[in-house]
Amino acid sequence: MPAYNARPFVEEAIRSVLTQDYPNIELVVIDDGSSDGTPELAEQYGHRVKVLRQQNAGPAAARNRGIAAASGEFIAFLDADDVWLPGKVALQVQYLQDHPDVGVVFGAFVRWHCQPDGTFSAPLSASNTTCKEFSLVAEHSGWVYTALLFDNVIHIITAMIRRTVVEEVGNMNESLSTGEDYEFWLRVSQQFRADKLARTLAYYRMHAASITQVPRKENNEYKVLLQAIAAYGLKGPDGVAASKSSLRSRLFDLCFSHGYFHIRNGDPKVAQEAFSAALKYSPLKPKVWVYWLFAAVKCTQAERGTRP
């Protein structure tokens, strides 16, 4: 559990782990340089939670340190502002034990939105995690490389992996401030099968402080995808190839959405660069040219405003 300034949420996340019905759970919380008392709250749980502290180095470094500190055969991930649903761990352990050819098992999640006053109501329970009959989401199960080219279908807070997966493919890329899990799953999908259970396993908290809500210059998902295509091509280990035209649309969407995010909340120069990249994949869309011109005007205004 990587944690950075997660004091309002970390106790709920910890409880969702410690109340699982699986008897043999080791919880490692890696405090990534918090200044709000997050590690002190985690330490109140005594021997039930191993708390490690480090200077702020990002989620990839925190996850890697947690993996190194863990002693279990299976490894699962939970961010400090999210929660697991009851029965998640036992269900996934059983699945991996029953399917030795599978390296990763994951499931669905629900976006957990705050109330108008900023608080979160208690998440609904999901009794489907207690059922031991496994039903899979076929299009996201097996050799999932091709599916990953179009979406990061493995949401990390729902995933459980074998330790041997990390030993084989290596740690998460610490040079990435975001998208480290996407890059990891793309590597994993070259060597291991991954199955998606047709169950809701976690709640993903939506709030303004979430790392995905902060404008960043780097379009890491786009960067990671380009690197994967260059390294592995369009075809997965199962021989299934992605459509080139569909992939162009995917690359366009990643560039355009990055530009749109920045034109609303971030840097107009970054937005203009992102719209320029989008035009490489779809140069005849008038909407993109309009946004590109709008970003250019905002860049000019910003430059004039900074002149002495």
Image (cartoon, rainbow, N blue to C red):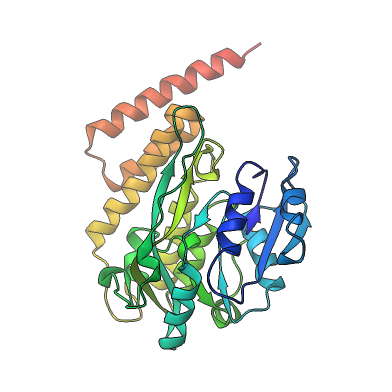
Residue 68, image x, y percentages: 69, 72
Q: Is residue 96 above or below residue 154?
A: below
User: Which residue is found at the position 43% from the left and 35% from the top?
Assistant: 261
Quadrant (top left, top right, bottom left, bottom right) of the C terminus: top right
Residue 55, image x, y percentages: 77, 51
Q: Is residue 85 left or right of residue 293?
A: right
Q: Is residue 247 above or below residue 282?
A: below
User: Which residue is found at the position 26% from the left and 69% from the top?
Assistant: 139
Quick check: can you spot residue 140?
yes
Between 103 and 292, the one lying in front of the other is 103
User: Which residue is found at the position 58% from the left and 62% from the top?
Assistant: 17
Quick check: can you spot residue 148?
no
Quadrant (top left, top right, bottom left, bottom right) of the N terminus: bottom right
Between 34 and 91, the one lying in front of the other is 91
Residue sticking out furthest to the top: 308
User: Which residue is found at the position 34% from the left and 28% from the top?
Assistant: 291
Between 300 and 214, the one lying in front of the other is 214
Q: Quadrant of residue 75?
A: bottom right
Q: Quadrant of residue 136?
A: bottom left
Residue 216, image x, y percentages: 54, 40
